[in-house]
Amino acid sequence: MANKGKSTLFNALTEGNAEVANYPFTTIDPNKGVAFVAKPCPHTELGKPCAPRNSKCVGGTRFVPINVIDVAGLVPGAHEGKGRGNQFLSDLSQADALICVADASGGTDDEGKPVELGSHDPCRDVQFLEQEVDYWLAEVLHRNALKCRGKPDQFKQVLAGLRIPEEEFRHAVSGDYAQISLQQYLPIATELRRKTKPLVIAANKADLPGAAENIEKIKAKFPYPVVAVSADAELSLKRAVAKGWVKIIRANDRESFELTAQNLDPRVTSALDQIKKKTIDKYGSTGVQELLNLIVFDLLHAIVVYPVEDEKKWANHFGDVLPDAILLPKGSKALDLAEKIHSDLAKGFLHAIDGRTNMKVSRDYVLKDGDVLKIVSAR
């Protein structure tokens, strides 16, 4: 969403350096980065420190990487090409989930221009995102249904490009999809968008006056998860951690911090006090980590699995403990894990060994969140 704090949130998620400014369309080309979802690390059960290779572990919490993209800002009429609409909507085609960044303080209008706090209804931010995405998706489906008339394989490729499973499309559409009008495609697009690109609302600027009331209003109006977020606070804390000023403490789904440096500039301590008072004490966290975890684990139903080569020491052949943490869809099987690691492992799959029970499991073993597994292969 234009100027709702989207680029600041991206930086808070990724510790990146997307351009941030108080005017519309700061983001022209999409920024791509890596963020991290958080899970308890199994090394605490083993009693030995882990040696992450593709992730990181801090204080017993494993942070597993995911890809995020900060796309061009959206304004009403984007599906007609207004603003950077065409670019924005094209970038969405590869997304597994969507974050709608709404200005909970009501301080940004539809065009992304700063206005008096509380003068704009943030529900409008969500409504026109729904409308613009649904119109765009309906137009893409309608146009390609006509273009691919009598060529089902080509239309399947269109669906694949939009990350829409063919079975989901068939479930949403009855009859000949090439005979459906654009208006008839709109409710189909809404259903497909909700099923294939789940949405969560990041109610940003939650620390500003009036935001708490607006957040409750958003929750009452929409069926999507809503997370109170202060991207500014999160970004400030991450920068303070990088400078060695503070340490983040996470416990019981709450977040806090403690000072680790002395003789800080009074302006720094005052800013940190404001973050604690207006964000941490009020909401329990800045909302940024909660936002990521909700998307990946609750909406996309992912699990984290740890492949090892030594099931007794939970290590690879170098002796590194729990070097890799892999995200897989819930319901994945041991064979899927093997395929994720290397196709040859899957082709020669014999069995797997559960690192906790030391029991052999078959290729059809359904993986559990936090599993530590050794794949035994003939290749």
Image: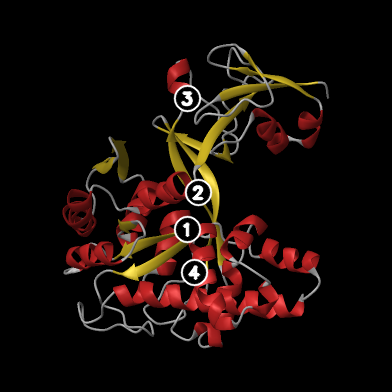
Kindly indicate whether the residue at mark 2 contacts the one at mark 1 (C-beta within 8 angstroms): yes
Q: Is residue 14 above or below residue 143?
A: above
- Chain-order first, disc 1 or disc 2: 1
Residue at the (37%, 53%) spot, across then down: 288
Residue at the (54%, 87%) spot, across then down: 80
- Chain-order first, disc 4 or disc 3: 3
Residue at the (42%, 82%) spot, across then down: 24
Q: Is residue 18 left or right of residue 165?
A: left
**Residue picked out by circle 1:** 198
Q: CA distance from mark 2 to mark 3?
A: 22 Å
Q: Which is closer to the viewer, label 2 or label 3? A: 2
Q: CA distance from mark 1 to mark 3?
A: 29 Å
Q: Position of residue 265 (x, y in %)?
A: 23, 55
- Chain-order first, disc 1 or disc 3: 3
Give amino acid for label 4: Thr
**Residue picked out by circle 4:** 190
Give amino acid for label 1: Pro
Kindly indicate whether the residue at mark 3 contacts the one at mark 4 (C-beta within 8 angstroms): no
